[in-house]
Image (cartoon, rainbow, N blue to C red):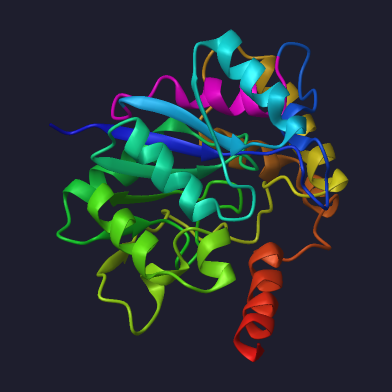
Amino acid sequence: MTNIVAIIQARQGSSRLPGKSMMKLTEDYCVLDFMIQRLMPSIRINKIVVATTHSEEDDTIEDLCNALGIACFRGSERNVLERFYQAAVKYKASHIVRLTGDCPLQDYRVVDDLINGYFDSSVDCVANAIFPTYPDGFDAEMFSFLVLEKVFKLATLPSEKEHVTPYIYKKSSPFIYKNIPFIKDYSHFRLTLDTKEDFQLIQIIALWMSSHKTYIHLPEILNYIEKNPELLHINNQYRRNEGYEKSLHEDSDYLDK
């Protein structure tokens, strides 16, 4: 039986923007709640799970999930791969869509297209940011439970455990993967949430979205930004994947031991 579980990793202990998951994004929604609401119309996801940590500061995340009727799994803070694997085991996932809580504007159609792309391909993993064309903030990956289990057993480096999937993309990896591109390259649009400037931009967009009664999809968001290009100057001093680059330095320390 196919059981597609979308697992959102989220925690309050961000070094660059502490408490970001529960920051008030609009009058009605905090960051994590806003993202969950954006995913709920999906016709392909069978279950949404928020995977957070055992840290006391993440009690508020569990409280939010309980209030929304969303499953919450609590596990290791640094070993996110282990957290994902244990969450997938608990909720009997046959397939996992990996999402991160720093993508509150995520569009369920982006996720459903990714899922369709996975089942249309004979690969172990599909992702839309291996060769980025989607805006930063719309990243998603999908793989089977069997692939996740193999990665959990094989991964050794700190970056592989903190970021869940790097092992899949190693040259020595046995896995076959495929990139799902967007219709046009918008990879220079930064719509992810890691800094106070990111929050400033995303809040402007979220408030604009909330002023509409209909669901606002990614093309409409991009059209709004293109009509207001000054918005991109708010956070354009930051690079994509800075957190992953930091983890690679930790790999060097680990290998030097």
Q: Evaluate whether residue 205 shows in this view.
A: no
The x, y position of residue 25, in whole percent, is 76, 25
Considering depth in this image, is 21 or 254 the residue closer to the camera?
254
Considering depth in this image, is 42 or 147 the residue closer to the camera?
147
Q: What stretch is highlighted in magenta?
A: 29-45
Residue drawn at x 34%, y 43% is 96
- Placement of 173 over or under 28, stated as above or below: below
Residue 37 inside the magenta-drawn segment: yes
- The C terminus sits in image quarter: bottom right
Residue drawn at x 70%, y 17% is 29
Q: Is residue 248 left or right of residue 193?
A: left
**Quarter of the image where one finds residue 240:** bottom right
**Quarter of the image where one finds residue 44:** top left
The x, y position of residue 154, in whole percent, is 36, 70
Q: Evaluate whether residue 124 shows in this view.
A: yes
Q: Is residue 88 left or right of residue 25?
A: left
Residue drawn at x 65%, y 16% is 63
Residue drawn at x 78%, y 12% is 27
